[in-house]
Image (spheres, grey):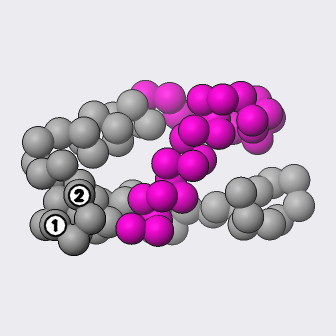
Amino acid sequence: MRRVWVLGVAMAALAAGAVSAAEVSGIDGQKVSDHIKILASDAFEGRGPATPGEAKTVAYMSGALHGLDTRRQSNGSTAL
């Protein structure tokens, strides 16, 4: 669940303009949109806590984020 929360915070920060364009230059808007459509689909059964939908969401997010370099380019910190 924490991973889902972290992604949500990151997306909210991007939407709010809290992250500069230089920091997100490698983000493909179409890929983000595709991920959102998948996560919003009925296949994830609402994604509620302690449900099969949550387990599916965590598995999807883990797979999608696996292997990504999540360090911020400015100082190497992984903190948001």
In the figure, 18 relative to 5: above or below? Answer: above
Disc number for residue 51:
1
Q: Are marks 1 and 2 in contact (CB under 8 Å)?
A: yes
Q: Is disc 2 surrounded by few (<14), some (14 to 19) or many (20+) residues within 10 Å?
A: few
Going by the numbered disc 2, the residue's amino acid type is Gly
Q: Point out the image quarter for the C terminus.
A: bottom right
Rendering coords of residue 33 (x, y %): 39, 31
- Side (left or right) of 4 relative to 47: right
From the image, give the main secondary structure of the stretch colored magenta: helix
Rendering coords of residue 70 (x, y %): 64, 61
* Residue 56 appears in view: no
Instruction: Name which residue lies at 34% across and 38% down.
Output: 36
User: Looking at this view, is 22 or 49 the one in front?
Assistant: 49
Determine the secondary structure under disc 1. loop
Magenta stretch encompasses residue 5: yes
Instruction: Name which residue lies at 16% across and 66% down.
Output: 51
Q: Point out the image quarter for the N terminus.
A: bottom left
Magenta stretch encompasses residue 37: no
**Label 1 vs label 2: CA separation?**
6 Å
Going by the numbered disc 1, the residue's amino acid type is Thr
Residue span colored magenta? 1-30
- Side (left or right) of 68 relative to 36: right
Rendering coords of residue 29 (x, y %): 50, 29
User: Looking at this view, is 52 or 26 the one in front?
Assistant: 52
Determine the secondary structure under disc 2. loop
Residue placed under numbered mark 2 in the picture? 48
The mark tally for this picture is 2
Q: Quadrant of residue 55?
A: bottom left
Instruction: Name which residue lies at 63% across and 35% down.
Output: 14
- Side (left or right) of 47 relative to 23: left
Residue found at the far right of this picture: 75
